[in-house]
Image (cartoon, rainbow, N blue to C red):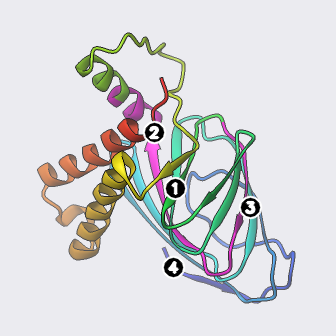
Amino acid sequence: MASRDRCNRSNTEYSGELPRDVGVRRLVSLGPERFHADMRHVDLGEGVQLSAISWGTAIEMETEPLPGRYLMTVPLAGEVMVNVGGTDVTADTGCAVIIGTEDETTQRWSADAAAIWLHLGRTAVEEEARHIARAEERAVSLPARRPVHLAPSLDLTRGDGQEWRAALQRLVDLLEERYSVESIPPHRLTALRRDVVAGLVRAAWRP
């Protein structure tokens, strides 16, 4: 996806192209810097998508619920402050924020913020949760129409969160190396995709 470069004044609303399926309702600049939005997006199949994004200025954004997907914000630099489901989360390189399928958000990105948006389809997350529940013999029932509840934030510096961040980075590195999804061997892409979904459910699921 091409970069967008727009002259901007404080509190000017952004009107350029936005990543698909992120439910942005409102996006405004909070500073005098030039609005230089750099957005790249790739669909990995099976409900998994990646967007790399930066705005080039401090911004405030409001988003609508995404009934069919979860959205993880994983900062590569700067800070992203998010009110999600009534909970305030500050995401940075050591902490990701997880936006559930029913959540509206208000977000503030610092001028130096850059992040990965990881989109996970609700079906993929629910199927993985059922698989984990069966494997661990948890007494958990997942109604067909009820979304899996994930914690609103994830510590990326230790434990399951650190392992999940490493799995995500392996996927990102492979995409940078191969340049396109089509050039990745299908079995390898499937394995990495599964690692990302399963790792997140293990790290953030709150049955």
Q: Residue furthest front?
A: 158
Q: Which kind of residue does numbered mark 2 sit on?
A: Ala
How far apart are labels 1 and 2 at the CA level?
11 Å
Which span is picked out in magenta?
103-128
Disc 2 and disc 3: Cα gap in Å?
24 Å
Marker count (numbered): 4
Decide if residue 183 is on the left or right side of residue 171: left
* Of callouts 2 and 3, the N-terminal one: 3
Secondary structure, mark 3, is strand
Secondary structure under tag 2 reads helix
Nearer the N terminus, badge 1 or badge 3? 3
Measuring from the top left, give residue 34's x and y in whole percent.
72, 89
Image location of residue 195, percent across then percent down: 26, 46
Name above or below for residue 21 compared with residue 13: above
Of circles 1 and 4, which is in front? 1
Q: Nearer the viewer, mark 1 or mark 3?
A: 1
- On residue 2, the disc is 4
Neighbour tally class for label 3: few under 14, some 14-19, many 20 plus, Cα within 10 Å: some
Q: Which mark is residue 52?
A: none
Closer to the chain start, of discs 1 and 2, is: 1
Q: Secondary structure at mark 1?
A: strand
Can you identify the residue that label 2 sits on?
204
Task: Pick whichever of labels 4 and 2 is earlier in the sequence.
Answer: 4
Instruction: Specify which label sits upstream in the sequence, 4 or 3.
Output: 4
